[in-house]
Image: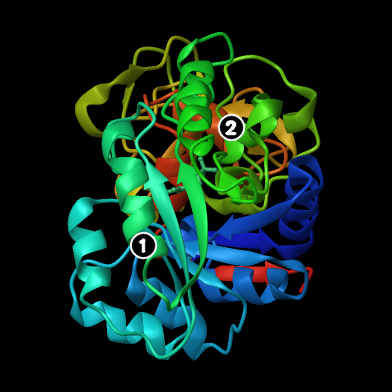
Amino acid sequence: MRPARATIDLDALRHNHRHARALGGGRALAVVKADAYGHGAVACARALEPEVDGFGVACIEEALELREAGIRAPVLLLEGVFDADELALVERHDLWTVVASPWQVDLLERHRAARPWTVWLKLDSGMHRLGLSPDEYLLAWRRLQALPWIDRLVAMTHFSRADELSHASTRDQIAVFDAALSQLPADTPASLSNSAGLMAWPTARRDWVRPGLMLYGSHMLDAPRAEADTLRAVMTLESKVIAVRELAAGEPIGYAGTFTTTRPTRVGVVAAGYADGYPQYATSGTPVIIDGRAGELIGRVSMDMLTVDLTDHPQAGLGSAVELWGPRLPVAEVAARSGNSPYRLLTGLKRVPRRYVGA
Ligand SMILES: *Cc1c(COP(=O)(O)O)cnc(C)c1O
């Protein structure tokens, strides 16, 4: 059997979730969109359900996957519905939905619900992607509040740069949000923070936080924060050395000859490549862990294989374990070596079997 695999540590997931929830101080919506950032939405949701306040997903298909697996906790559609037909599914499967555009307000006004709904109304506080502008927000709020079947309205917004700790934009977004919130009933629940907002911007914690990336043990904060230090990596991507060769100095390795040996070099071929989700353009020198010790990628990553330098790892050879990211090697660090993000690498996991531990 091909040795490439991803091990998902559900204890680490629960640990990170408890940390996020404690830090937020209120309720936490565990974001499990995009198949729980590549970790498996159903397995992760089952592991978290006993202690979760709710789950966040991108679309109805992802919500239905959770419901069909028997998940009963609240599930919020973070982008709302895409058309009127989806309203019946929201109703039938008892989902929560975001309203982020005026056309979605129109849609709800034409709907007649048979049960009480929870709706999160999204303000565009400066990211300028989804959300109602500050001018539109209060009117949209009143229109939704006038619908008798809307039982609970949550005010929300989303940050564009919360991982940049010294950038003013998050502070500005919080101020824009608070100005809108001050026009709403005093007991209105508020939600601003994704993982970075939650860890780095204490004034943005409020009633609900929406941690995603941090649940999986990663972050992109651009300066050290104690809040990120206790996170534990949930996924370990690893494989094994399946061939070894000795090369003289001056020999190219792999496609396009992007790396040429500068000394007699022992090369290990590892069974993992970009078709598994490892970044194709990770540069030579990208860290790997070979039998528990720090090592380096050399040469271009292929579809099914990559090559590592074993010269300084005399004990390593055929069958040696190679960790490509995980507890000993942050996925964010690997991502940075190819101009990628941990979001991209984790959600890009493909082909490798996932094995769950700590269930
Ligand atoms: C994806 C998403 C999150 C989670 O973001 P992270 O940066 O992964 O913590 C939170 N809120 C919304 C609206 C999202 O779309």
Dot 2 surroundings within 10 Å: few (below 14), some, or many (20 or more)?
A: many
Q: Is mark 2 within 8 Å of ligand 1?
A: yes
Q: Secondary structure at mark 2?
A: helix
> Which residue is depicted at the point 52% across and 68% down?
40
Can residue 79 be seen in the rendering of this structure? Answer: no
Is 330 located above or below residue 286 in the figure?
A: below
Work out whether 93 lies above or below 204: below
Q: Secondary structure at mark 1?
A: helix
In this rendering, which labeled residue sits more in front, label 1 or label 2? 1
Q: Amino acid at mark 1?
A: Leu
Identified at 51% across, 44% down, the residue is 184
Q: Amino acid at mark 2?
A: Ala
Reading the image, the residue beneath label 1 is: 144
The residue lying at 59 percent from left, 83 percent from top is 71
Q: Which mark is residue 196?
A: 2
Across the whole image, how many numbered discs are drawn on residues? 2
Res. 112 in view: yes
Foreground residue among 190 and 147: 147
Residue 306 drawn at (x, y percent):
41, 41
Query: In which quadrant of the rendered image does the C terminus lie?
Result: bottom right
Q: Is residue 310 left or right of residue 37?
A: right
